Image (spheres, rainbow, N blue to C red):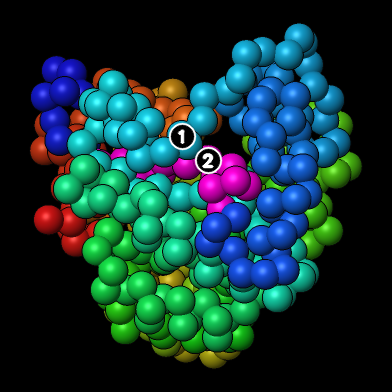
């Protein structure tokens, strides 16, 4: 069967926000920077403020990696709801949850005033320009890690806005990790709003754990480790500091890190817990049981698909009801829904992954 025979909800699609589109939603003085700073130009050679994940071998995946080969044509970017809807139709996708493209590394900024303004501008832009449930376009409220109280206010402001179905937590250079108690206002607001939080990673080289990857000489090494390290570190942080215990109705999604890292985390948490239970009594009887109740993962990249037994072990580690299809479209290594159909899974399980689990989690009509 083909993907067109199944309803498909993509939980990981990235839009592209030119400065000229974001500027009207920014407050002064940041709006003037976008309007007059010369950053509104577009094109393959306009690298400042842009990210080129769309062409293999061309992208300087990090500031430390060279551009390989000749300059390609302009990468494909989703610059409007019409472009997005056309892409979804072409790919056989009925609905999508969209996230930022250019702003994925906002977690690493230490300019708190700017980041707060950025979150407000992004949320306004999504609400007024992008979201359209009738067209299958949904979004996540940006919650900057640097300003938890401001982020909580944004969640309360947009929680009932038609089309917002989640909260976006940047996970690319965030310090401290998302288990820190300073973030409790964000988790409390998300739980009160009954919105899942989505931790979205990106290839990141930074001076904070676990992103100190500058000593690795190849882009392949950095790409292999960055997002998986980020997901592993932040999940363990959230579990062991009691985020899941303090917010038992909170649902947490890890986007764009694959699945294979999760059995490692759960196995080691359960192994060491009996010896250290007095430190974290809220994790009884086993840490993995809390994770399986409250944590979800998306399928991109399918890093465990080479072996059927490994695939099943990875899927069963989190549970079939907690797997969401995510493509990472339009980035160069995006996963097509057909790859899910090609897996040796029962038809009912495919339907869960491709749409039913996302429909239930995000409460889509």
Q: Does the magenta stretch include residue 21?
A: yes
Query: Measured along the vertical axis of the image, is residue 34 above or below residue 141?
Result: above
Query: Measured along the vertical axis of the image, is residue 30 above or below residue 311?
Result: below
Q: Name the residue under label 2.
A: 16
Q: Does the magenta stretch include residue 292?
A: no
Q: In which quarter of the image is residue 275?
A: bottom right
Q: Observer-nearest residue: 352 or 121? A: 121
Q: Mark 1 points at which residue?
A: 78
Which comes before the other along the chain, label 1 or label 2? Answer: 2
Q: What element carries label 2?
A: loop
Give x and y (percent) for residue 271. 51, 65
Is residue 214 visible from the viewing direction of this image? yes
Give x and y (percent) for residue 189. 40, 82
Residue at 15%, 35% in the rendered image: 7
Question: Which quadrant, please, contains the N terminus?
Answer: top left
Region of the chain picked out in magenta, as a range: 9-22
- C-alpha span from label 1 to label 2: 5 Å
Q: In which quarter of the image is residue 365?
A: bottom left
Give x and y (percent) for residue 282. 44, 87
CB under 8 Å between callouts 1 and 2?
yes
Q: What element carries label 1?
A: loop
């Amino acid at each position: 069967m083909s993907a067109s025979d199944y309803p498909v909800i993509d939980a990981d699609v990235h839009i592209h926000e030119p400065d000229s589109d974001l500027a009207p939603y920014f407050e002064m003085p940041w709006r003037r920077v976008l309007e007059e700073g010369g950053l509104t130009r577009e094109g393959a050679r306009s690298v400042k403020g842009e990210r080129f994940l769309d062409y293999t071998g061309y992208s300087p995946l990090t500031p430390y990696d060279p551009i390989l080969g000749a300059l390609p044509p302009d990468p494909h970017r989703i610059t409007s709801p019409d472009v997005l809807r056309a892409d979804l139709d072409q790919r056989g996708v009925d609905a999508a949850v969209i996230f930022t493209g250019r702003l994925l590394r906002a977690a690493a900024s230490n300019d708190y005033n700017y980041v707060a303004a950025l979150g407000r501008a992004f949320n306004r832009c999504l609400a007024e320009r992008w979201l359209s449930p009738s067209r299958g376009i949904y979004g996540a409220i940006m919650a900057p890690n640097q300003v938890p109280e401001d982020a909580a206010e944004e969640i309360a402001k947009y929680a009932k806005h038609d089309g917002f179905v989640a909260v976006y937590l940047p996970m690319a250079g965030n310090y401290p990790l998302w288990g820190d108690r300073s973030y409790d206002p964000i988790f409390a607001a998300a739980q009160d709003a009954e919105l899942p939080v989505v931790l979205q990673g990106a290839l990141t080289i930074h001076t904070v754990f676990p992103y100190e990857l500058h000593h690795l000489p190849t882009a392949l090494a950095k790409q292999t480790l960055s997002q998986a390290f980020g997901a592993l570190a932040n999940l363990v942080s959230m579990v062991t500091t009691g985020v899941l215990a303090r917010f038992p109705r909170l649902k947490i999604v890890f986007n764009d890190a694959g699945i294979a890292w999760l059995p490692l985390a759960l196995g080691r948490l359960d192994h060491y817990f009996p010896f250290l239970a007095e430190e974290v009594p809220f994790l009884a009887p086993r840490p993995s049981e809390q994770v399986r109740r409250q944590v979800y993962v998306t399928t991109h990249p399918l890093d465990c698909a080479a072996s059927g037994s490994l695939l099943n072990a990875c899927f069963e580690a989190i549970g079939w009801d907690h797997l969401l299809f995510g493509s990472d479209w339009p980035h160069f290594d995006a996963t097509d829904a057909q790859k899910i159909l090609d897996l040796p899974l029962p038809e009912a399980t495919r339907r869960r992954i491709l749409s039913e689990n996302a429909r239930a989690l995000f409460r889509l009509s």
